[in-house]
Amino acid sequence: MKLGIVGLPNVGKSTLFNAITNAGAQSANYAFCTIEPNVGVVAVPDKRLDKLTEMYNPAKTTPATIEFVDIAGLVKGASKGEGLGNKFLSHIREVDAIIHVVRCFENDDIIHVDGSINPARDIETINLELIFSDIEIVERRLDRSTKAMKGDKSLAKEVEFLKRLKDALENGIPARNVECDEDEQEIIDTTALLTAKPVIYACNMSEDDFANGIDSNEGYKKVCEIAKAEGAEVLPICAELEAEISSLSKEEKEMFLSELGIEQGGLDLLIQRSYSLLGLISYLTAGAPEVRAWTIKKGTKAPQAAGKIHSDFERGFIRAEVIAYDDLIANGSMAAAKEKGLVRSEGKEYVMKDGDIVLFRFNV
């Protein structure tokens, strides 16, 4: 899974990226500090892996991973090339979902590109640039499909939908909010539209906001209203705080957050929201050689899940021996769980569930 961190210059994108990836991306108080996208691969926190590691004492433990991409700040006119905009927009096309960092904190020492703090305006600026870029792409496909329709009448439905999609974009509606059937969704999926990507608005707030209660921040409340209307997710976060705790040990971090009355750090929450947004789950494999988490889409069947490990597993799939994580932990060992008949033999039509612990049987 690849997540693109976007936003206006100086909203805290690179600070957040550094904090959650420890990648050391350049971060400074001037626009276009980030030119080429910085990339960091982060392990997905999963307490189930810790328990399984205790149980199996494997040679290695491998978590699922997420790739974060820190994309340069966009500005008004980016879709027309302002601020190297076209280049930056192309970087966004390559990600699965967008983490849109919105500045909701006041600080006279950090310059805002528009001179004042206004989250609603900032969101509109970014969204309009993504929409303008999408309109151009839809217009080009519409033009090609209209010409091709003269010799192929089956394209009439596609042309009709592209016209409807263009109208929606011109009215400020992102592609992800356009109602469509399965065939129309495929058109969106094959058109590489920026506004079709799911979005999490990361409200970058001050440490005081968390101490006083995030609902006291008017900018945050406004972002929540916008996100609700769009069907997007919202994550309140303090990039500065995340940067402070990024170098702490796991125990120190938990103690620090507990003192602030915060249950989870920003990274954990960001990953959970991202998983939810993209419809992802993890299944687990466990044994003496390795304990490992594998990321799949909700609804994935056993053979395709097996293919995540190796294509031979999918090609020669026979069955999956499955036990729920909670059942294994409750019984203390695989042997005890088997005695109680909790390990099931599942076939090709089995739909994987989050936390399934699986042994795939295959023959090639």
Image: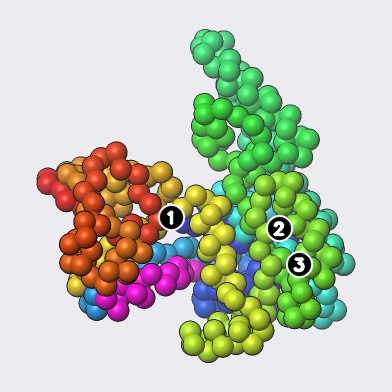
Residue tagged 3:
103
Q: Nearer the viewer, residue 63 or 283?
A: 283
Nearer to us of marks 3 and 2 is: 3
Q: Amino acid at mark 2?
A: Leu
Whole-percent x, y for residue 240 in the image = 67, 79
Taking the spot 30% from the left edge, 76% from the top edge, the residue there is 53
Say whether disc 1 or disc 3 marks the residue closer to the N-terminus: 3
Whole-percent x, y for residue 253 in the image = 54, 85
Q: Is residue 244 left or right of residue 151?
A: right
The residue stretch that appears in magenta: 40-55
Residue tagged 2:
74
Snapshot quadrant of residue 62: bottom left
Question: For residue 221: magenta?
Answer: no
Secondary structure of the residue carrying tag 1 is: strand
Residue tagged 1:
281
Q: Amino acid at mark 3?
A: Arg
Question: For residue 41: magenta?
Answer: yes
Q: Say how the picture is coloured.
A: rainbow
Taking the spot 42% from the left edge, 72% from the top edge, the residue there is 47
Cβ–Cβ below 8 Å for labels 1 and 2? no
